[in-house]
Amino acid sequence: MTTHPVHQPKYDWYQAGGLIRSVQFHALRGPEPLYIASVGVWPRSEVEVEVELQASQAAVGRPELVFRYRFDDASRCQEAASWDQLPGATAQLLVPEASIWDPKADEPSLHHLSVALFHEEQMLDCHHVRFGLRKVGTRGTQLLLNGAPLKLLGFNRHDMVDTPVLTFDQLLRDVLLLKDLGANFVRGAHYPQDPRFLDLCDEHGLLVWEEVLGWQNTAADFADATFMAQSFRMAEEMARASANHPSVIFYGFFNEGESFDDGDASCRAYESMAAQLRRHSGRSRLISYGSNHAGEDRQLGTVDVYAFHLYLAWYPTTHPVVKEEVEEIPGIWEQVRLWSLQAGEKPMLITEAGAGGVFGFRGSVSQKWTEEYQALLLSTHLAAATANPGIAGISLWQFADIPIDRSVSDEQHRPRGLNNKGVFSLHRIPKLSAAAVAELLRRVEGLG
């Protein structure tokens, strides 16, 4: 594991090889082509954006080159003189007829921006992007969206069915199922998300947590120069790819890493990765990581929002159900919240909590792996989060069952070669927990 340590066999999902998403090739003219590499749009107010333009190195020092832009369906293009400072340059622009991106709206407002590169009135390249005007932030223990308090209620989701290659229709189906459940939030586990999925979340008003690839990485990983270099590169690529998606409000990293370790390498890794993501966030995302080390985490100072994982009353899967463990769930989450405040007053999310339910296995509510017990446990976690004003949200684990690597997990932990914690089966057939969770979400006011 010295060449590509960012991909590790222990990761708890099926990792496919090859190309699993679309790839585009662009034909460029000449040995030093002139082109626009990217256009990032960062909201600065309800009517103003900061537009960051990246162009090819060949465009540097070429004052005869002209960049023109147009918003939405405007009839005329305008020139932005401040884009002369290439290869990376920014401009403050006013959006005509600006409309806020509101995820509660039936059709959240999205704007378009076209930027074209001209030389002697000949257009050499043109870049089109879509973006939304919204602001995300925090105030004390609250999350804020467009200045209003926000409670996140939703699910973790892997980008998989029985294969990691999803059609557009399958992605749309998942988004519509999430909305039908009453969710306003989806945590993309545990890697950068498909841009088609993010497009759909923009259009349907689903808020997204997106994160750099990782799962239970160790202090040894954090001291590995190759692992860190690949992680930094992926963080930059993820941020650039999702820059214009208003649905993405979190950038995450080092999921369930050894954040209890306070050695030099671990501290540098957490601090530098958080700084890297902030640098590329355009001041429009919150930074966090999912921690399964509540009570002993040493890296909470690096994040904007605390995010904790606990699988209460579930592990070990071979132990019988203990009724008292289920009843203690709300109190334990409150203890975690109070403990986290010792690191500073910030919002706290429950970013993983759940239980397995083997699809079609019906039985006692007091028996693990039954759909009945799964429904009880997920409902208990969700009720604890909705009833506690100090908890800013929850993403239940998980939306749908996924395939795992049978060489990593055995039948006692992952029956049928699946992570069975979904409220839907692998093929998106609802379990009892889907209806139970949806009923609770319907009672929560203010969700879109």
Image (tube, helix red, strand yellow):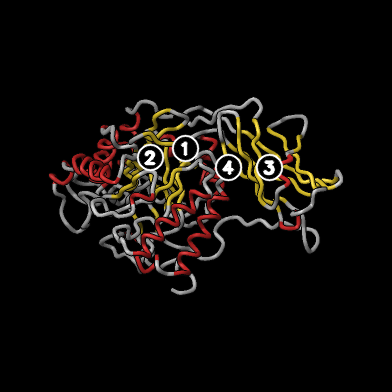
Whole-number angstrom distance, CA of label 1 to CA of label 3: 23 Å
The dot on residue 244 is: 4
Q: Which residue is mark 1?
A: 206
Disc 4 and disc 3 in contact, CB within 8 angstroms: no
Pointer 1 or 2: first along the chain: 2
Q: Three-letter amino acid code at disc 4?
A: Asn
Disc 2 and disc 4 in contact, CB within 8 angstroms: no
Q: Three-letter amino acid code at disc 2?
A: Gly
> Are there few (<14), some (14-19), or many (20+) residues within 10 Å of tag 2?
many
Q: Nearer the viewer, mark 4 or mark 1?
A: 4
Disc 1 and disc 2 in contact, CB within 8 angstroms: yes
Whole-number angstrom distance, CA of label 3 to CA of label 2: 31 Å
Q: Nearer the viewer, residue 446 or 20?
A: 446
Total labels drawn: 4
Q: Nearer the viewer, residue 357 or 239?
A: 239
The dot on residue 128 is: 3
Q: Three-letter amino acid code at disc 1?
A: Leu
The dot on residue 154 is: 2
The dot on residue 37 is: none
Whole-number angstrom distance, CA of label 1 to CA of label 2: 9 Å
Residue found at x 50% / y 55%: 235
324 to the left or right of 308: left
Pointer 2 or 4: first along the chain: 2
Q: Secondary structure at mark 3?
A: strand
